[in-house]
Amino acid sequence: MNSMNTTQKYVAKTLFGLEDVLAEELAGLEADNISVSKRAVYFEGDEELLYLANLSLRTCLRILKPIKIFKAANPEILYKNVVKYNWHELISNDDTLVIDSVVNSEFFKHSKYAALKVKDAILDEIRKAKGKRPNIDIENPTYRINVHIEKNNCTISLDSSGESLHKRGYRIMSEKAPLNEVLAAGMIQLSGWDGNSNFIDLMCGSGTLVIEAALFANNIAPNLNRKHFGFMNWSSFDENVFKKVKQKLFTEQKKFNKKIIANDISKSAIKSAQANAEKAEVNKFISFNNDDFVNFQYDLEPGIVITNPPYGERLKHIDIIQFYKKIGDTLKKQFTGFDVWILSANKEALKQIGLRTSRKLMLYNGALECKFHKYEMYKGSKKAKFKSDK
C-alpha cells in the first residue's frame, strides 16, 4: 500500500507548556484532526506531511507513528500483544533497531524491563518468520521503536524523526546549561513576537534564543539542513517527494529587515554564539555585543527582549538577589517601549525585578520548573499608557 497519499495518525512530542504552540504550528501545515494532550499533539496526514513536519516544526521533539495499541497489565500480556504483529514484514535481518520506552504505570515498575520485553517479542517474531534475528544498534539504528505505557494502555510506535528534533545541528560550541532549542523556539512563539520588530537577548549564552529568532524571522525551517531522519529508512520513503518538500521550504523563506542583538558579558559565550550562528547560516542577521547588560547601549526602535538569566545555582544567594534587582533597574532605565520576557527557575530572585508582570507562564528548562514572565515597559505609568490609548 502506498502510504504517501494515505492519511495516517501521528503523535508529535513536545515539552510541557508548548502543546498549544505546537498545535498551532501543525494547523499552519494543514494537518488534520489535531488534538492536544500532555506533552504531545495528535494529528493526521499523509507521509508527505510527515516529511514537512519533521523539517519545519520548531516546537516538536519527535514525531511518532503508532502501529499497535492495546491494553496490558503485566509483562507477559505485553509480550503476547507485541509478538502478534508481523514485524518481519517491516524489519529485515539486515536492519538494526533500538527500543525507547516511556512508562507511567503501577503494572510496570521499570521502563527498561518493559522495553526489554518488547525487544524480545519483536526479535522472536522475526526469528520465527525468517530464521534469524536482526541486531540492536543503540547509536544508529535503522528502526527506532517507541514504547509508551500509561497505566495499562500500551502504544507501540515507529519513530519517524530518529535523533530528537531539538538537535538542529548548529550547536558546535556550548556554554554551561545551554537552552534546549525547542524550548527557545517555544518561548519566542509564546511571546507573540512576529519577526517584524527588533529582538534582543541581554544574556545570550551560546546563542540559542537569537539563532531560533533568526530562523523564525526569516521563515527558515529549523531542520532544513539536517542530514538524516528516521523515516528515511522506511520502505515507504520517497526521496523525490522529500526533495520537493525541501525545495518548497527554501522558496518560502523571507528576508528579515529588523535587528537581532546578542549580548553577553562573557567573551567565550559570544564566541560560542557567533560560531553556532555561523553554523546555522544566520550570523548575518545577528549583531553580537560583549558587555555587561547594565552597560548595554542600542540605537534602534523598541521591540522585544527575551532572556534567560542565571538562576543562582552557581552564584551565592546574595549575589543572585542583587543581580535580579539590577535586571529590573536596567529594564526601567534603558528599555522603555519594549516588551520584556524573562525565563527563570528562581522564584525569589524574580520578585526582585520589581516590575509588574502582564503575563505569567510555566515552562520546564530540563528538570527545572521555570516561570516565564512578561513585563511591558511603558513610558511613564501603566495608568498613563491606558489614558493615552483612549
Image (cartoon, grey):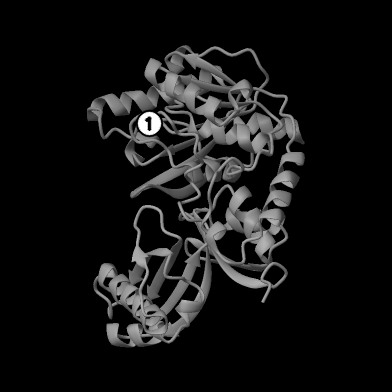
Does residue 266 lie above or below 10 as drawn?
above
Relative image position of residue 143 (x, y in whole percent): 45, 63
Does residue 136 lie above or below 361 as drawn?
below
Question: Total marks drawn?
Answer: 1
What residue is at 44 percent from the left and 38 percent from the top? 343
Left/right placement of residue 48 relative to residue 281 reads right
Picture quadrant of residue 36: bottom right
Identify the image quadrant of the C terminus. top right
Q: Nearer the viewer, residue 197 or 97?
A: 97
Left/right placement of residue 216 relative to residue 265 reads right
Q: Nearer the viewer, residue 29 or 293?
A: 29
Q: Nearer the viewer, residue 301 or 230?
A: 230
Does residue 27 lie above or below 32 as drawn?
above
Picture quadrant of residue 29: bottom right
The residue tagged 1 is 352
Residue 324 appears in the figure: yes
What residue is at 53 percent from the left and 53 percent from the top? 229
Relative image position of residue 256 (x, y in whole percent): 71, 28
Relative image position of residue 377 (x, y in whole percent): 58, 28
Indicate the amino acid at tag 1.
Answer: Gln
Residue 202 appears in the figure: no
Q: Nearer the viewer, residue 141 or 101?
A: 141
Left/right placement of residue 221 relative to residue 15 reads right
Under circle 1, the secondary element is: loop
Assess disc 1: are there few (<14), some (14-19) or many (≥20) residues with their C-alpha within 10 Å of its C-alpha.
Answer: some
Left/right placement of residue 196 relative to residue 310 reads right
